[in-house]
């Protein structure tokens, strides 16, 4: 905006800075906040029409339930901004839970370290394969989805063996609360804030956007493309493992029948949050809105009550389509210049 | 996938298929309102929540949910909320928590999994909400974490299937197991019960093949097709639910087998499976009864009235064989 | 003492020897031109020098030490900074982020200091005459401005060697002068510069030494001043000097072919598009080449795309051959006889994965098919005709277009347009980034097509090309037609003054 | 899987191998697996076994064909399983009006779903994975609503002929799949639609500017994919002799995508390998069959599948040329 050009150098880009900038800003804001706008609308309607929705407890339940998906979607946001995708998170989530429950016999620290180590290692394998062999992320992580589930079944006698959480500290973490809001919500909030700072304020964050925006350009500009890619998958794996661990803490056991379709929910949340699947753009704030939106919709469908489960599916599908279409049009509204 | 999916026709035929409680031994543990620490309420005006685990996409689940709703209607319970977790365990947990938040006073839960209910118990016990779990048991302390369990004994079902299989095969031969969905308690118990009993009553029967058919007819069929290629000398197939067994029968027909060449025994008691006995393709079907409504509310009424109720209410499952299939098919669901 | 030196490097791609024992030396403070036809191996040599590719043979020495760069980052750290020919920035990131990517200023907590980054970015860019909000997405900037950002980025690090691969291909004359100012500065500081360009004037203006590549082989290296222009061209093309001498600066005949009295084949009336186009009006008669002049961002590309139905119009009328084109879409425009050659060949022109054959036939599939089934013989006929006519060099019609050199890609694109039998050709920078030989061929082709009665609209940032190629020039500024040059007015001077005076009057 | 020879300097032979492997690696893998089975799996080399494998793979092949077309346009379709469920739900409802009527209704359901997907992708501009996710979730729900959650036994023998009948000693199901492979192969290679589809996948803006009816082609592609899925759905119903909307085609989208990618079609669009897709489906089928025949547990099966997918895709991966 400020025109610092010296008197003798003529302004080369003499476009109408004012209008271009305004359009730009609005497009950016709406794209980033479209999910938030939809979320607010939905919340207002829900508050007005469902008395049971209006309680603090209900809000706390929604937040606690949204904690693991939030972690997974956080990792997914990083991955998707680089232009990748991670289908393995659902399996890693279950695996993380089983490992955490098993390791809890050695204390709470072990209960976190083991799932983080194993899921991080699988994320690392994903990342290495994707970064160094140029195999499509979709297919590499699809294989990891199968592999991690196989591993989970292998260590739980084909899933029939549910390990119980042995550590009281871990159970407490899962079901205790601070200011009446579950510990896990605070933990997730802290990680989300760290994630935001990393993405917006560190060189690693810049690299993530650069890799997704244009991989070739990024590598020519000296961005460590491969290292960045490896790291986002490691992060995604770690976060999925952690999500599994905090979920195990809440459930008190390493439940093996979880997590199917979790990766698709996470992708949906991220996309609803305005992150482009093609990479290069996206925000964590949007992802938060996306995750909460899905959680609230679920809660509302229950509030309506006594709906046959199949109708519930039809309604969720329709709602998903409506939200994404609305979001797209909000963005488009300003694009037509 | 469900452990019990079935052929057409839902609804309840109260007279034909009502659940019957196994006569409990005298010293069986009971629970009273006092022991549990709850307050007396009138069910009619109470808020009641029912959490279903799987989609109402198969007769067992349809019959189960319908039976709860019908019975509530019959008893004049107006504030019944039902949720369905669509086979997603975390959703079932938050469904139940949401119902607790909204102030339900009695919870009936068909759990998706036996473990993992810590957070629900924490919330429910704080408010002293009694929980009746139906069809699958929860691994926790009755009369404390939850009130009582009403359902079948899955290991027992497996054992009875083994007895029938041994009988049908003349105590010798090779048998294949079509397992249910991996990781499911029902699968585990129906498998262990069957294998233990076979080893006991018919040691000459070898279990040569165990593959999952995920409780689904199509997968039961596919797995059986492969099985018949690699083990053409198989004599018996144990399906951990009727659906897989029916898939197996289709595969047997496709492979040119005749009715009775391979003995088929399964669990559930759906019309289709019982019909297969009549047609000669299946040897026996062990029932697993889904009509929990009357028993669940009867137990709750007794409990709130201060009477002791059993902590473990095991229902009697009937069984169909060549002798009674034709006559009793109307009782199948 | 050489700054950067390679001896006998080779680079082999499947099917091509892109570099064949090439040696090259760069002295400190030298501006070294690297020239050659499209596909001669210039970009490949640069990529080998900067660690993008590993050579299949040969040796690299930097500051008299044997060197090997595994990645572009290694080369950058060692002080070799490069503006690559193609993509080199990230369009979705802001201008400032692009400028500082990988070396962002950080505060004491190790976090990126956004405020400082933006401030410094503004200051740096102002030095290159670019004044814009540095928090804008780079992709929304005009190509020229993007190129300037890339340049600023390359020069900002303490480089000892700056490599520029066709930096001026999307720059305005004025921007080119700014660039040259920067080069002279670097030169004075003793920094070595490798400069790749197809514009010979520029080479002679700014370079000291020259290295010429042909088909991946070194054909000449030495002082540029000692090499006659004609000689340079003949070395590049591997052709006889006399043959080259016969042809002028551009291959345009310079003779008007338009018929003054004929009814216009294209009538454009009062095109309006929010913020970009305002009442743009002009005619094109059959056989006429109408140039669209103006600075970057003047709206030339938008005008062309709007006529081709690919840019949103709020109002306006377009008539082709007397018939109105209602609600233009690309499909309708092609049907009406309009063919558009977009500015960005890679992103909007060719389909790189498909063969030459399929690219040429792409727009006319219904015509070469019956009942939805394509007829190979009909396609072959068309492909054969245009490959011959445009002298497209490909190993076979089944070669993927992405593997061709820039000039040949451009010709394939033109062939696709011509195959639709258009009445009007809209050409946006048809000779950008293609070598002298191919350029001449394209230019004479444009003449030839106009001679056959097509109406042609020509956009070119090369003022000489625009002036020599056009019968008339319509000058745009900020989406407004500010003047039309006809007859003897069609000169570079008149063009510049029209742009300049109108610009003054507006401010 | 044959190993790639590592050489310091590319010689002609390794170059040839490198060019050959991506194209034919999947066939080589099939051959290896078959050879292994012939030696180590009893009763493998029998006609009836081949027959079973072909029958089982047929529905996946049919779905994968449509998926390959969608992937060729740089899209993806998650809703195929739900389409199969919808087709399955309609069959028993309309079988009373005759086999043809039932089939037409099932196909129309496919057309409708494909149309919605196509419009969401082409006109609204949603990203394919999200656009089809909506119907992935909602479609099956709708199917189960339509069928009222009931599993219905099918007894119409004409209809069952499609699933279990033979023609000239070969199952009808296999004939149909083979015919569809030929048709799709022909469409991709020889029709205007096929060429346009590839151009759109290769460079959509270019295809738009060249005046191709991009939106129409995209909608068509999704319709074709959904119709193929509904064919697979009705054939599955005919094969298992009952219609169960809640289970038919469950998770088939992943099998189909795997088949397509293992078969060498890149997810980045612009290219469709029809025979490769068939081979990809066949390879995965053989892997699963081998596991089952050797009575391995699901955990092992899953892990082995993961490894085989990785190896197959690694070998078939496109080397970056540009
Ligand atoms: N990655 C690659 N894979 C295969 N062939 C390539 C690759 N890069 C370049 N080539 C081929 O190598 C030769 C040299 O290409 P290069 O880009 O170096 O030419 P150039 O002199 O820069 O041409 P231009 O003036 O068009 O930029 C060409 O034949 C080109 O097709
Ligand atoms: N003020 C602006 N705001 C956003 N984008 C702009 C602006 N000015 C130019 N651009 C973009 O920069 C590119 C070049 O601008 P435009 O097409 O208007 O110029 P032109 O006269 O065709 O110049 P040329 O074809 O020589 O690049 C276009 O892609 C356009 O969208
Ligand atoms: Mg080049
Ligand atoms: Mg332009």
Image (spheres, grey):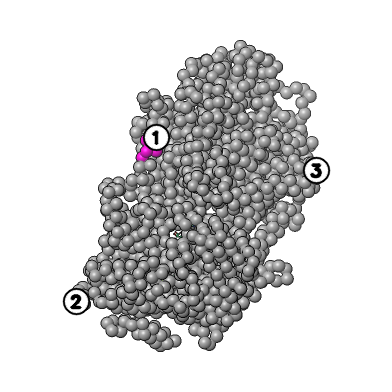
Side of D266 where B269 appears, left or right:
right
Q: Secondary structure at mark 2?
A: loop
A261 or A325, which is in the foreground? A261
Give the x, y percent position of residue A256. 66, 39
Which quadrant holds the C terminus of chain B? top right
A160 or C447, which is in the foreground? C447
Q: Residues within 10 Å of mark 3 (few under 14, many from 20)?
A: few
- Residue that mark 1 sits on: D178
Side of B327 where C401 appears, left or right:
left
Side of A31 where B306 appears, left or right:
right
C398 or C359, which is in the foreground? C398
Q: Chain of mark 2?
A: C
Tell if the residue under mark 3 belongs to the same chain as the one under mark 2: no
Residue D181 on the magenta segment: yes
Q: Chain of mark 3?
A: A
By secondary structure, the bulk of the magenta-drawn segment is best described as helix
Residue drawn at the location 47% of the way across and 27% of the way down: D50
D22 or D286, which is in the foreground? D22
- Residue C261, numbered label: 2
- Residue that mark 3 sits on: A106
Q: Quadrant of residue C406?
A: bottom left
Question: Hey, which residue is sitting farthest left in the picture?
Answer: C261
Q: CA distance from mark 3 to mark 1?
A: 57 Å
Q: CA distance from mark 1 to mark 2?
A: 63 Å
Residue drawn at the location 43% of the way across and 71% of the way down: C198
Q: Is residue A196 above or below residue D23?
A: below
Question: Hey, which residue is sitting farthest top in the picture?
Answer: B170
Give the x, y percent position of residue C477. 39, 79
Q: Which residues are magenta?
A: D178-183
């Amino acid at each position: 905006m400020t025109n610092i050009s010296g008197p003798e150098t003529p302004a080369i880009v003499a476009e109408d800075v004012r209008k271009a900038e305004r359009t730009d800003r609005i497009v950016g804001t709406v794209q980033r906040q479209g999910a938030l706008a939809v979320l607010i609308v939905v919340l207002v309607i829900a508050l007005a029409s469902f008395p049971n929705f209006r309680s603090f407890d209900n809000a706390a339940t929604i937040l606690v339930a949204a904690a693991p998906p939030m972690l997974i979607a956080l990792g997914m946001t990083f991955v998707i901004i680089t232009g990748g995708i991670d289908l393995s998170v659902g399996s890693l989530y279950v695996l993380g839970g089983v490992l955490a429950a098993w390791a809890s016999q050695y204390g709470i620290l072990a209960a976190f370290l083991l799932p983080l180590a194993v899921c991080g290692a699988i994320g690392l394998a994903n990342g290495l394969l994707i970064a160094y062999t140029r195999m499509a992320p979709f297919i590499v992580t699809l294989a990891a989805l199968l592999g991690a589930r196989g591993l989970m079944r292998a260590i739980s006698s084909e899933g029939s063996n549910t390990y119980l959480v042995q550590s009281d500290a871990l159970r407490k973490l899962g079901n205790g609360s601070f200011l009446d809001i579950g510990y896990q919500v605070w933990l997730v909030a802290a990680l989300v804030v760290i994630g935001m700072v990393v993405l917006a304020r560190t060189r690693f964050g810049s690299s993530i956007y650069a890799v997704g925006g244009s991989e070739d350009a990024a590598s020519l500009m000296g961005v460590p493309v491969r290292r960045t890619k490896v790291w986002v998958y490691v992060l995604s794996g770690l976060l999925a493992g952690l999500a599994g661990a905090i979920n195990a803490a809440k459930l008190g056991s390493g439940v093996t029948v979880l997590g199917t379709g979790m990766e698709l929910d996470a992708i949906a949340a991220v996309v609803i949050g305005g992150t482009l699947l093609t990479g290069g753009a996206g925000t964590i704030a949007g992802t938060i809105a996306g995750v909460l939106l899905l959680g609230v919709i679920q809660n509302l469908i229950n509030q309506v009550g006594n709906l046959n489960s199949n109708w519930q599916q039809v309604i969720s599908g329709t709602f998903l389509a409506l939200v994404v279409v609305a979001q797209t049009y909000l963005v488009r509204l300003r694009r037509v210049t | 996938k469900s452990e019990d999916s079935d052929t057409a026709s839902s609804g309840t035929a109260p007279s034909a298929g009502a659940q019957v409680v196994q006569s409990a031994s005298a010293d069986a543990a009971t629970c009273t309102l006092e022991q549990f620490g709850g307050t007396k309420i009138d069910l009619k005006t109470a808020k009641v929540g029912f959490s279903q685990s799987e989609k109402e996409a198969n007769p067992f689940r349809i019959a189960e949910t319908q039976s709860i709703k019908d019975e509530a209607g019959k008893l004049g319970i107006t504030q019944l909320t039902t949720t369905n977790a669509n086979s997603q365990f975390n959703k079932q947990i938050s469904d139940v928590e949401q119902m607790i938040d909204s102030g339900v006073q009695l919870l009936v839960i068909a759990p998706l999994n036996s473990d993992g209910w810590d957070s629900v118990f924490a919330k429910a016990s704080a408010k002293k909400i009694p929980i009746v779990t139906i069809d699958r048991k929860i691994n926790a302390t009755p009369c404390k974490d939850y009130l009582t369990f009403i359902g079948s004994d899955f290991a027992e079902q497996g054992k009875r299937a083994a007895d029938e299989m041994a009988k049908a095969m003349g105590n010798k031969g090779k048998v294949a197991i079509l397992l249910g969905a991996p990781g499911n308690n029902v699968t585990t118990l129906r498998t262990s019960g069957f294998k233990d009993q076979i080893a006991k009553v018919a040691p000459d029967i070898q279990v040569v093949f165990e593959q999952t058919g995920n409780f689904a007819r199509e997968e039961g069929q596919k797995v059986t097709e492969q099985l018949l290629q690699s083990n053409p000398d198989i004599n018996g197939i144990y399906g951990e639910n009727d659906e897989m067994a029916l898939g197996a029968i289709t595969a047997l027909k496709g492979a040119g087998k005749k009715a009775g060449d391979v003995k088929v025994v399964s669990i559930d008691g759906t019309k289709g499976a019982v019909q297969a006995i009549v047609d000669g393709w299946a040897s026996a079907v062990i029932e697993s009864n889904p009509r929990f409504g009357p028993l669940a509310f009867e137990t709750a009424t007794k409990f709130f009235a201060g009477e002791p109720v059993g902590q473990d209410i095991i229902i009697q499952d009937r069984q169909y064989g060549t002798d009674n299939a034709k006559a009793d098919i109307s009782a199948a669901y | 003492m050489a700054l950067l030196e390679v001896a006998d490097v080779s680079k082999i791609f499947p099917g091509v020897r892109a570099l064949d024992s090439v040696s090259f030396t760069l002295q400190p403070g030298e501006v070294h031109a690297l020239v050659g036809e499209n596909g001669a191996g210039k970009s490949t040599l640069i990529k080998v020098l900067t660690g993008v590719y590993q050579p299949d043979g040969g040796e690299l020495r930097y500051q008299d030490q044997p060197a090997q760069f595994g990645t572009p980052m290694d080369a950058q750290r060692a002080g070799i900074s490069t503006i690559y020919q193609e993509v080199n920035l990230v369009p979705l990131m802001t201008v400032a982020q692009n400028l500082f990517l990988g070396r962002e200023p950080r505060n004491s907590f190790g976090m990126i200091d956004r405020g400082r980054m933006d401030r410094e970015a503004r200051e740096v860019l102002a030095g290159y005459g670019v004044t814009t909000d540095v928090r804008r997405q780079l992709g929304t900037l005009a190509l020229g401005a993007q190129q300037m950002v890339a340049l600023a980025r390359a020069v900002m690090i303490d480089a000892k060697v700056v490599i520029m691969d066709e930096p001026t291909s999307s720059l305005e004359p004025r921007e080119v002068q700014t660039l040259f100012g920067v080069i002279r500065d670097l030169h004075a500081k003793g920094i070595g510069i490798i400069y790749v360009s197809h514009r010979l004037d520029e080479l002679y203006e700014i370079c000291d030494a020259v290295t010429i590549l042909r088909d991946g082989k070194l054909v000449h290296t030495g002082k540029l001043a000692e090499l006659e222009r004609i000689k340079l061209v003949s070395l590049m093309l591997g052709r006889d000097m006399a043959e080259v001498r016969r042809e002028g600066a551009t291959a345009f005949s310079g003779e008007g072919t338009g018929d003054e009295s004929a009814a216009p084949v294209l009538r454009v009336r009062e095109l309006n598009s929010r913020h970009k186009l305002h009442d743009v009006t002009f005619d094109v008669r059959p056989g006429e080449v109408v140039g669209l002049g103006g600075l970057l961002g003047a709206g030339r590309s938008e005008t062309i795309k709007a006529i081709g139905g690919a840019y949103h119009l709020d109002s306006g009328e377009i008539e082709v051959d007397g018939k109105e084109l209602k609600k233009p879409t690309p499909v309708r425009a092609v049907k009406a006889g309009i063919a558009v050659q977009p500015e960005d060949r890679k992103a909007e022109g060719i389909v790189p994965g498909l063969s030459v054959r399929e690219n040429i036939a792409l727009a006319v599939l219904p015509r070469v098919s019956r009942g939805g089934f394509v007829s190979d013989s009909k396609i072959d006929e068309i492909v054969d005709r245009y490959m011959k006519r445009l002298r497209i060099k490909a190993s076979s019609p089944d070669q993927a277009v992405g593997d061709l050199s820039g000039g040949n890609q451009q010709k394939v694109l033109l062939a696709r347009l011509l195959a639709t039998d258009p009445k009007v050709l809209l050409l946006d920078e048809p000779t950008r980034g293609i070598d002298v030989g191919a350029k001449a061929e394209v230019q004479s082709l444009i003449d030839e097509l106009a001679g056959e009665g097509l109406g042609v609209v020509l956009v070119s940032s090369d003022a000489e090309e625009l002036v020599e190629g056009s019968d008339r020039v319509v000058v745009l500024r900020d989406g407004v037609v500010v003047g039309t040059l006809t007859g003897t007015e069609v000169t570079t001077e008149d063009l510049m003054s029209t742009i300049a005076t109108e610009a003054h009057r507006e401010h | 899987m044959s190993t790639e020879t590592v050489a310091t300097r590319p010689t002609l032979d390794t170059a040839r191998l490198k060019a050959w492997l991506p194209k034919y690696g999947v066939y080589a893998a099939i051959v290896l697996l078959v050879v292994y089975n012939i030696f180590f799996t009893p009763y493998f080399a029998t006609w009836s076994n081949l027959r079973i494998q072909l029958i089982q793979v047929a529905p996946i092949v049919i779905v994968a064909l449509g998926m390959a077309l969608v992937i060729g346009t740089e899209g993806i379709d998650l809703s195929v399983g739900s389409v199969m469920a919808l087709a399955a739900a309609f069959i028993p409802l309309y079988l009373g009006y005759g086999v043809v009527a039932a089939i037409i209704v099932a196909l129309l359901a496919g057309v409708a779903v494909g149309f919605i997907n196509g419009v969401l992708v082409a006109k609204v501009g949603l990203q394919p994975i999200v656009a089809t996710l909506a119907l992935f979730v909602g479609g099956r729900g709708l199917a189960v609503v339509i069928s009222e959650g009931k599993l219905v036994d099918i007894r119409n023998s004409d209809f069952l002929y499609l699933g279990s009948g033979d023609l000239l000693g070969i199952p009808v199901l296999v004939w149909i799949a083979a015919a569809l492979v030929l048709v799709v192969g022909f469409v991709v290679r020889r029709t205007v639609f096929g060429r346009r589809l590839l151009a759109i996948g290769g460079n959509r803006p270019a295809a738009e500017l060249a005046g191709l009816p991009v939106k129409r082609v995209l909608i068509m592609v999704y319709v074709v994919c959904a119709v193929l899925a509904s064919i697979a759905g009705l054939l599955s119903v005919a094969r298992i002799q009952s219609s169960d909307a809640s289970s038919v085609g469950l998770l088939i989208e992943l099998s189909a995508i795997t088949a397509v990618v293992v078969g060498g079609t890149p997810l980045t669009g612009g290219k469709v390998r029809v025979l490769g897709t068939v081979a990809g489906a066949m390879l995965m089928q053989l892997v699963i069959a081998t596991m089952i025949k050797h009575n391995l547990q699901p955990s092992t099966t899953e892990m082995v599948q993961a490894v085989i997918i990785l190896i197959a895709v690694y070998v078939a991966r496109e080397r970056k040329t540009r």
